[in-house]
Amino acid sequence: MPEFVVPETDSVHRGLSRRTVVKTAAWSVPVIAMAVAAPVAVASTAPAPCAALPVGSFTVVGGNLVSDGRVGTSPTSDGLFGTGWTPPKAPVQDPQTGLWSQTDSAVAPTPASWWSGGGDPQNSVGFLSLDDNDNRDGADQTPSVITANYAVDVKAGIAYSFTMPVYASADYLGPQYLDISVAGAGANMPGVVQGYYGNPAIAVVPNGLVGYTHFGSAQTPATTFTPSSDGTVLFTYTFTLPYVTGGSRQNADLFVTSPALSSCA
């Protein structure tokens, strides 16, 4: 296969692979639960006032997340992890096995130094989906599905308007899809945001995702809901990385920051 050429419009990638940063996480197959002691423990920088907080863990089901979709390298073998909560934490290596792990955070020490989407994974409370599906020839073509949640306490009868910033990078790669749904305390709003970044023409895209719209490199969608009871509302972010058949056999990347009230005292 000829060498893939990065478009000149994506100049931040020239001379620097998107996979040259050090990454951290803890993986197992086929389901991964990323445990966190408490929502505020996932980040060294506190969320902005009136923002939803990350909830305890994130999960990966279906296909295997790998540090480079072309070669299918397990992050536990090469210490390169790029999916998880931000800001990052330093990775930990087991002295007995030599495997690297991190239970709740993404890249460290400088997440996505190549990042062109406009977000700030190094300092923002958010979630970075940087790793790839296993896109090697002969892989079973099962997409990797990552789920992460944010929670906010609400009161009945009050209208809440939240913004949900989404940043994207590497549109020339295979696609990555995102669904944001809102539920709890009498609110039920599936699919308030559904979009993708990357090129679906070089991927095996699941039927349920075909109608998603194409993201820009940065956007701030919003939603409004009025709970019917006091309680907790969850913002559920579902990232889907389908099997990529062409190009450099990697998936595009997404970064989201905590949902925030568009106005609050």
Image: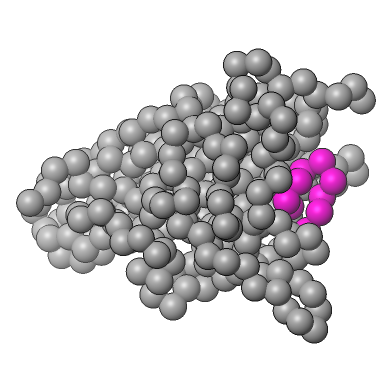
Percent from the top left, x then y, of residue 171?
60, 26
Which of 213 and 102 lies nearest the eye of the viewer? 102
Residue 34 vs residue 95: left or right? Answer: left
Please tell me whether residue 96 is drawn above or below residue 198 in the rendered image. below
Q: What residue sits 26% from the left and 48% below the top?
A: 260
Q: Residue at x 62, y 64 (%)?
A: 25
- Name the image quarter holding the N terminus: top right
Residue 71 covered by magenta stretch: yes
* Residue at screen point 59% across, 37% down: 114
- Closest to the observer, 12 or 256: 12
Q: Is residue 210 magenta?
A: no
Outermost residue toward the bottom in this view: 96
Is 245 situated left or right of 164 in this image? right
Q: Residue furthest top?
A: 8
Instruction: Identify the residue shown where x is 39% and y is 55%.
Output: 125
Q: Is residue 110 left or right of residue 61?
A: left
- Residue 11 sits in quarter: top right
Region in magenta = 66-74
Nearest to the observer: residue 225 or residue 22? 22
User: Where residue 154 sits: x, y (%)?
Assistant: 17, 60
